[in-house]
Image (cartoon, helix red, strand yellow):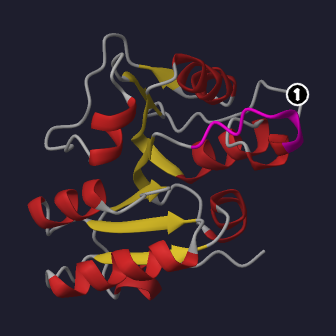
Amino acid sequence: MTRVPWSAVFGDDRPVEVEIGPGRGDTLLAFAAARPATNFFAIERAARAAEEIAARATGHNLANVRVVAGDARCIVERFVADASVAAYHLYFPDPWPKTRHRDRRLATAPFARALARTLVPGGTVHVASDLRDVVDQLVTRLVSSGLAPVPDAAPPPGRPITKFERKYATGGTHYARLVRQMDGGSGSRDADG
């Protein structure tokens, strides 16, 4: 399997954070502007949205942003190198509640294992949703893949409240942060796929 080194994507060896499903890109662009010494990679399912985010990043002269359109599960599982991502950001992922949409859900054992495998020791996964069940499902899978939940975790500093969040999270936002242990442990204890 061909893993793509981040240096080939960004042209440098700065830390990389990945946002999955960036929507309009408000969080991604805010983080990239505030932290120019970190590279930000976004995976957006919709090609048009990915193009618009990339254009906004270019318009703001954010050289530390790359955006790709595609299925995050496939991209992370097949192309992201082991222990190469400092943080993942999953904010308001689509819940895909219908049974026929099951294959689109992110809360799967293979995806959780891929996130754990690709995190650097000490790396984090940030999850937020207006639906507690979505957060709980992802946390369960990530813990089963060897990540440790951080009790009473708060969102990362500088994470903006997006238009989507203001509209849909009227009952509040549920948040979780998980960490890959410094010993590098990311073995899977979750047998189902």
Task: Quarter of the image for the N terminus: give it.
Answer: bottom right
Give the image quarter of residue 100: top right
The residue identified by callout 1 is 191
Can you give x and y, in whole percent of width and height, for residue 4 in the image? Answer: 58, 79
Where 187 sits versus 176, above or below?
below
Q: Is residue 73 left or right of residue 192?
A: left
Can you give x and y, in whole percent of width and height, for residue 44 in the image? Answer: 52, 66
Can you give x and y, in whole percent of width and height, for residue 169 in the image? Answer: 36, 27
Q: Crowding near pointer 1: few (<14 within 10 Å), some, many (20+)?
A: few
Does the magenta run of residues contain 84?
no
Where 164 sits versus 64, above or below?
above
Q: Which residues are magenta?
A: 94-100
Query: Count of labels shown?
Result: 1
Where 141 sits versus 70, above or below?
above
Q: Is residue 77 left or right of residue 128?
A: right
Q: Is residue 45 left or right of residue 190?
A: left
Residue shown at the point (54%, 43%) measured from the top left: 93
The residue positioned farthest toward the top in the image shown: 151
Residue shown at the point (27%, 54%) measured from the top left: 27
Which of 150/90 is in front?
Answer: 90
Task: Determine the secondary structure under disc 1.
Answer: loop
Where 176 sits versus 2, above or below?
above
Main SS of the magenta segment? loop
